[in-house]
């Protein structure tokens, strides 16, 4: 038997970046063997057994031969089970079982009975294939809706390997009793639940206003207060105040969740996501990583939305400080020996904290059982460099009986607040057109100092002269002042706006 060669195309993901992989199968005489080369991980190497069993289940048994599969480019690491389908097609083409000369993309995991199972990362993979000039994709039925989100790509959904063999001009049959993998169903959106509405928050007028300002400017927020003050409730309601994601952010967010395995549906994620990791979460869980193929963590899954760290001082210092880089750059870069994986991570950080370990160092502190050293040690877990990236630092007091007495009155809900936030964001976007910035939280100090009226900056300038505010803190105060002005529909901040921004930065400036 003369040597024969078959080819098929797949995609390997590194972070959210897809790379087209040429799967080459070479069949020749010699001792029966099956070898996969090209930096394949264990899951890819095990594909030979899944493909062998799946072909046999379709009535296309594997003939004894010497088969070598090359995954090109060979220098690119290959991970996961998504290459199963392309590998099976390459082998079938090499064996002259089918003839496929069209430039198709093949994605999918094979079951031993030949069923085609959904895989992670279909959206970024199909986008990468389209950008490489491929116009047709064959994907599992469970991923058809996700693949169909990519414009300009003809998507073919298959349930069984036998269906693909027939599509490619070969002969195959499904074994009796085999059912296709069930397509994934889109879960209900928890952000639409009534409990996540601001109308449920009574009192806390200062905190409500601070949350609105944070939403309008994309500012990070720290709330410090005793247990039961409503810090967690307020933090969880921030996504409901944010506008829908634009198309680019929606694609990025959906791609991240596709890779993470948390996306199930057939439409783009258009609402800002909410991530609330527990304080026992590791750095890998929050930032991302892991052995083999790096996975996005909570910070990347919160891209375009909100990352809430409830009881922030309880998080390990390593986890908190690992957020400093994404807060500055808007992305997370995970370095491995074989290369670097990049994930988007532009989110709003909301941290909550008690004033001390027992939580009762408020007012006269009569009920607090903590020593002065313990109080200082507790809050010092939030490092200066991390706090320096937080624009709004708010003290949240307990809701008083007077506030509860007004519980029967109509409280403004998330929809009304979100409308003001949307107008403020549109104002900022129009003002910042052509700069590359879209929210006030991204604007640099020189621009702020050049465009803010000198009279409005007077109090902040005095604070700098007296050593009460650093220049970095000065810029952050001006950012918040611009957001306050946008909400009030003013062309530029006034002195009162800067004063309010100074008040919202009550904690000592690092």
Image (tube, rainbow, N blue to C red):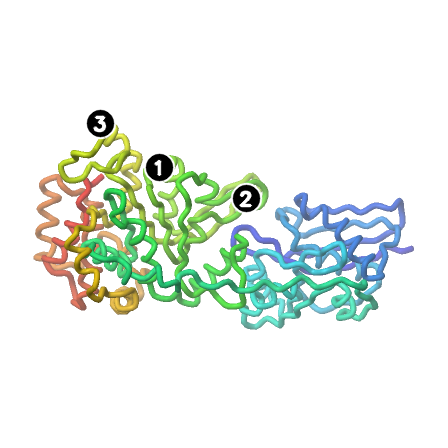
Answer few, some or many: residues within 10 Å of disc 2's Cα (few below 14, many 20 plus, some between 14 and 19). Answer: few
Label 3, on which residue?
A: 371
Q: Could you tell which of marks 2 and 3 lies nearer the N-terminus?
A: 2
Q: Is residue 105 left or right of residue 405?
A: right
Whether residue 380 is situated above or below residue 469 in the rendered picture: above
Q: Is residue 469 visible?
A: yes
Relative image position of residue 189 (x, y in whole percent):
44, 63
Quadrant containing the N terminus is bottom right
Q: Is disc 2 in contact with disc 3, using a CB cutoff of under 8 Å? A: no
**Residue at screen point 70% across, 55% down:** 84
Relative image position of residue 185 (x, y in whole percent):
56, 64
Q: Which of label 2 and label 3 is nearer to you?
A: 3
Relative image position of residue 435 (x, y in whole percent):
30, 62
- Element under disc 1: helix
Residue 233's label in the rendered image is none
- Element under disc 3: loop
491 or 258: nearer the viewer: 258
Label 1, on which residue?
A: 314
Quadrant containing the C terminus is top left
Residue 339's label in the rendered image is 2
**Residue at screen point 25% across, 67% down:** 420
**Residue at screen point 68% across, 52% down:** 72
Whether residue 231 is situated above or below residue 358 in the rendered picture: below
Q: Could you tell which of marks 1 and 3 lies nearer the N-terminus?
A: 1
Q: Which of label 1 and label 2 is nearer to you?
A: 1
């Amino acid at each position: 038997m003369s040597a024969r060669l078959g080819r098929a195309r797949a995609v390997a993901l590194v972070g959210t970046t897809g790379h087209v992989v040429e799967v080459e199968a070479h069949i020749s005489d010699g001792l029966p063997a099956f070898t996969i080369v090209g930096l394949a991980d264990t899951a890819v190497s095990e594909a030979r057994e899944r493909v062998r069993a799946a072909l046999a289940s379709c009535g296309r048994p594997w003939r004894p031969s010497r088969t070598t599969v090359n995954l090109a480019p060979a220098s690119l690491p290959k991970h996961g089970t998504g290459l199963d389908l392309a590998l099976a097609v390459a082998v079938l083409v090499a064996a002259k079982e089918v003839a496929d000369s069209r430039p198709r993309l093949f994605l999918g995991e094979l079951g031993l009975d030949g069923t085609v199972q959904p895989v992670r990362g279909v959206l970024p993979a199909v986008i990468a294939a389209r950008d490489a000039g491929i116009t047709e994709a064959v994907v599992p039925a469970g991923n058809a809706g996700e693949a169909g989100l990519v414009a300009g790509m003809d998507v073919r959904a298959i349930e069984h390997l036998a269906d693909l063999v027939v599509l490619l001009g070969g002969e195959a049959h499904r074994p009796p009793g085999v059912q296709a993998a069930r397509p994934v169903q889109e879960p209900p959106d928890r952000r639409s639940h009534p409990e996540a509405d601001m109308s449920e928050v009574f009192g806390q007028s200062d905190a409500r206003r601070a949350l609105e300002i944070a939403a309008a400017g994309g500012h990070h927020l720290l709330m410090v207060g005793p247990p039961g003050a409503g810090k967690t409730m307020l933090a969880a309601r921030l996504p409901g105040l944010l506008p829908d994601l634009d198309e680019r952010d929606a694609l990025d967010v959906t791609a991240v969740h596709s890779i993470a395995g948390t996306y199930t549906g057939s439409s783009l994620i258009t609402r800002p996501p909410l991530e609330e990791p527990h304080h026992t979460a590791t750095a890998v869980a929050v930032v991302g990583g892991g052995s083999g193929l790096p996975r996005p963590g909570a910070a990347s899954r919160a891209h375009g939305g909100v990352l809430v760290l409830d009881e922030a001082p309880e998080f390990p210092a390593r986890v908190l400080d690992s957020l400093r880089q994404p807060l500055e750059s808007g992305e997370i870069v995970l370095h491995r020996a074989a290369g670097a994986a990049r994930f988007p991570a532009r989110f709003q950080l909301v941290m909550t904290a008690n004033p001390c370990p027992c939580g009762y160092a408020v007012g006269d502190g009569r009920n607090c059982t903590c020593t002065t050293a313990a109080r200082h040690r507790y809050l010092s877990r939030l490092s200066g460099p991390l706090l320096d990236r937080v624009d709004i630092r708010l003290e949240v007091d307990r809701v008083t009986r007077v506030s509860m007495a007004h519980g029967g009155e109509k409280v403004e809900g998330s929809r009304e607040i979100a409308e003001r936030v949307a107008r403020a964001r549109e104002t900022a976007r129009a003002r910042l057109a052509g700069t590359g910035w879209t929210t006030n939280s991204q604007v640099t100090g020189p621009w702020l100092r050049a465009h803010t009226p000198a009279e409005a900056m007077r109090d902040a300038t005095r604070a700098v002269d007296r050593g009460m505010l650093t220049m970095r803190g000065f810029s952050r105060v001006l950012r918040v002042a611009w957001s306050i002005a946008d909400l009030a529909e003013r062309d530029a901040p006034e002195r009162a706006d800067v004063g309010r921004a100074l008040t919202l930065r009550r904690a000592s400036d690092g």
